[in-house]
Amino acid sequence: MKGQQKQEDRYEIRFSGSGGQGLITAAVVFAEAVGVYDGKYVCQTQSYGPEARGGKSKAEVVISSKPIDYPKALELDLLLAMNQAACDAYFYDLKQNGLLVVDSGLVEQHPTSRIIAIPFTDIAKDEIGRKLVANMVALGAVGLLSGQVDLDNLEKALLARVPKGTEEMNSRALQRGIEEARKINLDDLPRAVMSDDYDEV
């Protein structure tokens, strides 16, 4: 990272994919869990590409135990990519030891071996019965893998945000994502997303 000095004690997450995948909702729920229920400092920002539905969309959550001096992500600790375009566009924003989490059914070309691939959309469609809740399956996995949020509080924030009548479905989706992420041993991953001779630009 050049120019902007990154604040210590700061964790950055980007939820990315296509418009219509519900990633902004997932980021808002995560931010509310961290800020309202966990009592940490948090900033949540979002942006849509001109293609909105079907094109790239991203939402960021910056977390700290101290007041946050700059609200946007500078070097990602965790990138969730729910399609190939988002993975390709945002991968280079990851820190050297950042974590890339992808939907294995929608991201087939992996830019690094430091990757966690989980079939979020297939789980939502085949097990929960609604492809629409893939974002909540992913949210559960990100919640566990980031280590930045109390998972009970993540569920409370989720249930406070989703439409009436969909609470059980969304809760099941969240729990399935957590279950899948529990199978991952982060110590088995390479230590860096790029080789040692990689230089930031």
Image (cartoon, rainbow, N blue to C red):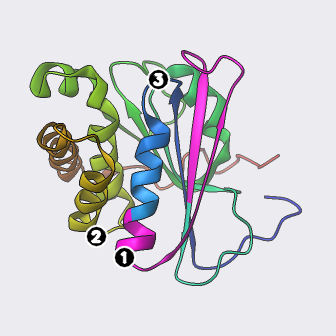
Q: Residue at x 29, y 44 (%)?
A: 162
Element under label 3? loop
- 59 falls in the magenta region: yes
Q: Which residues are magenta?
A: 33-61
Q: Which mark is residue 20?
A: 3
2 or 3: tag closer to the N-terminus: 3
**In the current view of this chain or complex, which residue is farthest to the bottom?**
66
**2 or 3: mark nearer the eye:** 3
Alpha carbon separation for disc pair 2 and 1 = 7 Å
Q: Is residue 56 left or right of residue 147?
A: right
Please tell me in which quadrant of the rendered image residue 165 appears: top left
2 or 1: tag closer to the N-terminus: 1
Q: Is residue 26 above or below residue 143?
A: above
Is there CB contact under 8 Å for labels 2 and 3?
A: no
State the residue position of label 1: 38
**2 or 1: mark nearer the eye:** 1
Q: Is residue 148 visible?
A: no
